[in-house]
Amino acid sequence: MARRIATAAAYGGGGVGLLGGAAVGLVLTEVQLARRQLLRNGREDPPPLADGVYGAEYAAGAGAGPAAVPWRLAMLGDSTAAGMGVHRAPQTPGALLASGLAAVSERPVELHNVALSGAKSDDLERQVSMLLTEPGRAPAPDVCVIMIGANDITGRMAPAESVKHLSDAVARLRTAGCQVIVGTCPDLGSVEPVAQPLRWIARRLCRQLAAAQTIAVVELGGRTVSLGDLLGPEFAARPGELFGPDRYHPSAAGYVTAAMAVLPTLCAALGVWPEEERVEPLRREGYLPVERAATRAAAVGGTEVSAAGEESAERRSPWALLKRRRRRQLPAQPAEPDGADRDGTDGDGPDRNDPEKEGTDRKAPETDSTGRVADADREERQELSP
């Protein structure tokens, strides 16, 4: 496993390895300075606590059947998973995904969010332990969504070390019977004060980590959704709408776009996505060696990668299925969860945020994942083999 992780970390670099350490250090310093500049004149409020039951109305019509038992959804990761930048519980990505899953499956969803602003991948061990061993959280979640990686980049954690921490967390969750979806490292090249060529370097570093994350997660039976490219064109075109007040984390509209990218994969992992599971070559879907699928996904936001199953069994090395699922609109006005404070604040609940940690991550929206066709896609159509 250690050698595969080290090999995975080499994918997606696209020339970063040829750059000197000084250049990489400079871009990371630029990102950190940009973050501090944006927060200099204001205080970063903790994200609202969104834990609770969503879609409780579906239980009323289900009687005593299985549909009356809520799905258990857990959010792990950094400030994006926690919902930094918004002020009401229904605006957080966890609440948006819980509401969306409840609407698609017509079954209530119980949300547990243990994500921590400023967290790096080495904090996932603590977060997984909270979910699996903390009193009051049993049984294990049905499905977990992890969003992690930006702070690993800015904190200069080695990609192999970062992916090893993520792999350990995914392995523990899979052993406990959880489905796992990982939103891979976002694109820090979209931070406004970072200019070219430093923006290009930041983007390549993030894609390198995202590709490595994908390989490790898929080999362990999880699924990934690429979030990196969601930050680029859409945020650049509509920064006032999709960025929050700190100009760094997503706004409420930004989180909606990111949640729309993850929801189809979340529902498919539980077998409730209302589309036939088939490969559509016209949408640039297909089977690829897992390393190649990972690099493709890192370059196009909203792309799902999962294990290839029988297709992979026929190959000498692991293969993966690359999909670009159609999206659906989320519920227009997600309600406050049952059991949450009505003002959307933490109230007397636990504070997930460590004041000693400085959140340096962010990500979000994108354009339609089928509408962005780069020159590389022509090459991809030839390589995909449905």
Image: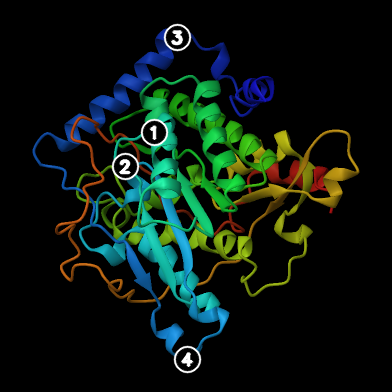
**Disc 2 or disc 4, which is closer to the eye?**
4
Mark 1 → mark 2, Cα distance in angstroms: 8 Å
Q: Earlier in the sequence, mark 2 or mark 4?
A: 4
Question: Along the polypeptide, which appears first: circle 1 or circle 2?
Answer: 2
Disc number placed over residue 61 in the picture, else none: 4
Q: Residue placed at 50% from the left, 53% from the top?
A: 144
The quarter of the image holding the C terminus is bottom right
Q: Earlier in the sequence, mark 3 or mark 4?
A: 3
Residue 193 in picture, x, y percent from top left? 28, 32
Q: Is 293 situated left or right of 371 in this image?
A: right
User: Taking 334 as reference, is 227 above or below it?
Assistant: above
Graded by Cα atoms within 10 Å as few (under 14), some (14 to 19) or many (20 or more), the crowding at tag 1 reads some
**Helix, strand or loop status at disc 4:** loop
User: What label sits on residue 21 in the rendered view?
Assistant: 3
* Rendered view: 323 above or below 101: above
Q: Is residue 17 left or right of residue 42?
A: right
Left/right placement of residue 92 relative to residue 4 reads left
**Image location of residue 125, percent across then percent down:** 44, 35
- Give the residue displayed 54% in from the left and 19% down from the top: 16
**Tag in front: 3 or 4:** 4
Callout 4 crowding tier (Cα within 10 Å): few <14, some 14–19, many ≥20: few
Q: CA distance from mark 3 to mark 4?
A: 60 Å
Residue under numbered circle 2: 116
User: Which residue is identified by label 1?
Assistant: 123
